[in-house]
Image (cartoon, rainbow, N blue to C red):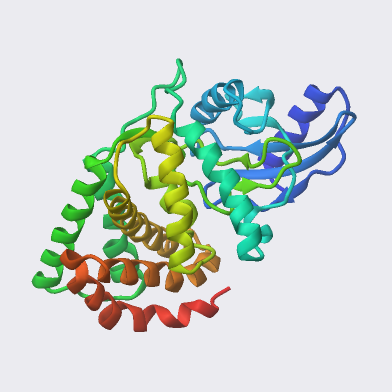
Amino acid sequence: MDQRYDAMLAWLSQRLGTAPQTPEPVAGDASFRRYFRVQTPEGSRIVMDAPPEKESCGAFVALTHHWHQHGLHVPELLAEDQAQGFLLLEDLGDRLYLDELTSEASADRLYGEALSALVRLQGLPSPPDHPLPPYDRERLQQEMQLFPDWLLEQKLGLKLSSQEQAMLATTFATLTESALAQPRVTVHRDYHSRNLLVTDDNSPGIIDFQDAVTGPITYDAASLLRDCYVAWPLEKVYQWLETYRLEAREAGLHQADEATFRQWFELMGIQRHLKASGIFARLDQRDGKPRYLADIPRTLAYIISAARRQPALEHFGDWLSERVAPAVEPMAGAK
């Protein structure tokens, strides 16, 4: 395949004491990392290939050890070579939440398990050898700027007027202040149906957590319940959110009432979906990965509906509906 693949095979042979069977590619995330499934005498394993010049393994290794020790079902780290960017991991299987969320009944069970695991995750301190960076004002603003930079301007070719730019700046400020006002917890940062696996024991299995930070309590709940890849009726989302709010309060993570927590959640979801829409467009425009374009219409619809439920953002929601939604609607069929 390529030089890195050959180097990975050589590393595996050295670690396993024998040449492995041909590794099978596993669908990866939107980064430069690649994943392969390999059969060993001890069973199936996952190999992560993270080019050191593009992806550091340090955060993943530190979090894997720390979260595994505290009972979260993350893949056990079996061997590592951070200099080359190779990790050998426990195989958590391939039963993604996205494929198992087939009905509201299955969602009740799976989200219940995922939200309980999230409460445990949020209550953990940083790993002793990897202080988690803060989800601060600068990071929040930079993420939202991906929306106009990559979706509106690069992908759609829209030229924003000074009034439109001012409206975006006001919206971003509102969302940032809400995020910064929330209690701070450990944040996975991509806690959704493509990064959670149904497992036989201690479900869910949790992957792709190397970008964890310390940040707003509702961020991961918004990632999960307002998923870019699957949509549920708003009434069900609010039911799951309230169950989670009570469990997190019982764990001492916050003291917010239902109305406050719901507003945090709604505004946090808008911030995340602005970022996600921009990232999906960037993956197409910069990285040649068009398959995420099909998720933009759903993600934008989340932003519009949530904005219209907030008096301060209602105008923003209407503007998106009139100016942006018609341009992204054809993307729903992208591949």
In this rendering, position of residue 270 left or right of residue 25: left
The image shows a total of numbered marks equal to: 0
Q: Measuring 68% from the left and 40% from the top, which residue is drawn there? A: 3
Q: Nearer the viewer, residue 201 or 212?
A: 201
Residue 270: x and y in percent read: 32, 59
Q: Is residue 213 visible?
A: no
Residue 29: x and y in percent read: 57, 50
Q: Measuring 13% from the left and 74% from the top, which residue is drawn there? A: 161
In this rendering, position of residue 171 left or right of residue 62: left
Q: Nearer the viewer, residue 298 or 259?
A: 259
Residue 305 appears in which quarter of the rendering?
bottom left
Q: Measuring 30% from the left and 75% from the top, which residue is drawn there? A: 157
Q: Is residue 326 above or below residue 1?
A: below
Q: Nearer the viewer, residue 308 or 112?
A: 112
In this rendering, position of residue 54 left or right of residue 41: left
In this rendering, position of residue 303 left or right of residue 46: left
Q: Measuring 44% from the left and 35% from the top, which residue is drawn there? A: 212
Q: Is residue 208 visible?
A: yes
Identify the image quadrant of the C terminus. Answer: bottom right
Residue 6 appears in which quarter of the rendering?
top right
Q: Nearer the viewer, residue 154 or 107?
A: 107
Residue 73: x and y in percent read: 64, 33
Residue 238 appears in which quarter of the rendering?
bottom left
